[in-house]
Amino acid sequence: MGRLVAIDFGEKRCGIAETDDLKMIASPLTTVATSEIIAFLQKYIQKHPVDAWILGEARYLNGDASAITQLQANFQVLLEKKFPTIPVHRVNEMFTSAMATKAIQMGGASKKQRADKGLVDAVSAAIILQTYLG
């Protein structure tokens, strides 16, 4: 029984979140430079079995693709090629950054922590994963 891993894919960095082994709780894990994401995931699956990748999909309010949607689709193809036995599921990531920022603020984070874009990306990935879990 493996975990679910969510990826908030961005041009510069990717937020990563994971479930517990029972797939009940989504937790932020880390942020990784986009150029290093595949290497990070390869190391991750050596330590933890993964049942599926959950990848955020950026869309505008009207449902149209945003500027990064094509990059996310290209990344999905790469994930499917590098990890052919692990399925990829897409989840609408609309407003996740704003929700992550608010959650960090409400959690009592310092001003420095609230300004940490990496933390926002990791929390955004956890929100994507929680959305997938329902």
Image: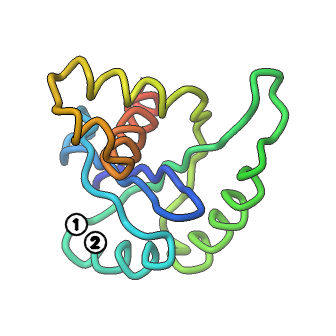
Q: Secondary structure at mark 2?
A: helix
Labels 1 and 2 touching (C-beta < 8 A): yes
Farthest front residue? 111
Callout 1 amino acid: His
Looking at the picture, how far across and down is residue 63, in whole percent? Answer: 81, 28
User: Label for residue 4?
Assistant: none
Q: In the image, is 1 to the left or to the right of 50?
A: left
The residue shown at (22%, 66%) is 48
What colouring style does the render use? rainbow
The residue shown at (64%, 43%) is 57
Q: Calculate the distance from the C-alpha at mark 1 to the C-alpha at mark 2.
A: 6 Å
Residue toward you, 122 or 2: 122
Q: Which residue is mark 1?
A: 48
- Above or below: residue 8 compared with residue 83: above
Q: Which residue is mark 2?
A: 44
Looking at the picture, how far across and down is residue 112, in whole percent? Answer: 22, 41
The residue shown at (34%, 59%) is 31
- Image quadrant occupied by the N terminus: bottom left
